[in-house]
């Protein structure tokens, strides 16, 4: 019961602090605020995994941790690839690019 109460208390605090940061506009820069919120979210994920899912390196012979690591690798690959594709689509498909192409087509022999 003590572990569940500790986890609950940490979850409430890790939810209340970001809520306060956003509602009172404590951090005016939106990028900095987003990074801080992501850090609080990551910490809360760890708290939930430890206190509520009881995940550690010893549970089920370490297979839970191996599955978690595999999942994280897949998520990182997927997110990185998606951001990379969107960046290159944005760079290579800008509306001004079509204007430059029409000028090049006009100059063809």
Image: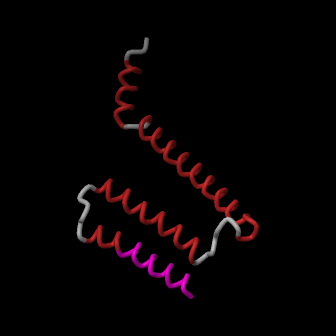
Left or right: 65 in relation to 36: right
Q: Which sits in the foreground, 8 or 108?
A: 8
> Which quadrant does the C terminus fall into?
top left
* x and y percentages locating residue 74 in the rendered image: 63, 53
> Which quadrant does the N terminus fall into?
bottom right
Residue with the most extreme top position = 109
97, above or below 63, in the image: above
- In terms of image quadrants, where is residue 100? top left
Left or right: 2 in relation to 36: right
Residue at 47%, 40% in the rendered image: 89
Q: Which sits in the foreground, 31 or 82?
A: 31
Q: Main secondary structure of the magenta part?
A: helix
Residue 84 falls inside the magenta stretch: no
Q: Which sits in the foreground, 109 or 35?
A: 35
Residue at 26%, 61% in the rendered image: 27
Residue at 67%, 63% in the rendered image: 65
- In terms of image quadrants, where is residue 96? top left
Residue at 72%, 64% in the rendered image: 62
* x and y percentages locating residue 18 in the rendered image: 35, 69
Residue with the most extreme right position = 61
* x and y percentages locating residue 35 in the rendered image: 38, 56
55, above or below 96, in the image: below
Residue with the most extreme front position = 2
96, above or below 33, in the image: above
38, above or below 108, in the image: below
How is the structure coloured here? secondary structure
Q: Which sits in the foreground, 56 or 93?
A: 56
* x and y percentages locating residue 92 in the rendered image: 44, 34
Q: Which residues are magenta?
A: 1-16
How many numbered discs sit on the rendered protein?
A: 0
- In terms of image quadrants, where is residue 72? bottom right
């Amino acid at each position: 019961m003590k572990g569940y109460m500790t986890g609950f208390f940490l979850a409430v605090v890790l939810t209340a602090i970001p809520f306060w940061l956003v509602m009172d506009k404590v951090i005016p820069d939106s990028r900095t605020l987003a990074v801080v919120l992501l850090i609080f979210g990551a910490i809360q994920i760890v708290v939930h995994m430890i206190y509520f899912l009881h995940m550690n390196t010893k549970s089920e012979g370490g297979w839970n941790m191996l599955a978690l690591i595999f999942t994280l690798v897949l998520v990182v690959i997927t997110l990185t690839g998606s951001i990379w594709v969107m960046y290159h689509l944005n760079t290579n498909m800008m509306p001004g690019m079509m204007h430059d192409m029409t000028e090049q087509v006009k100059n063809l022999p």
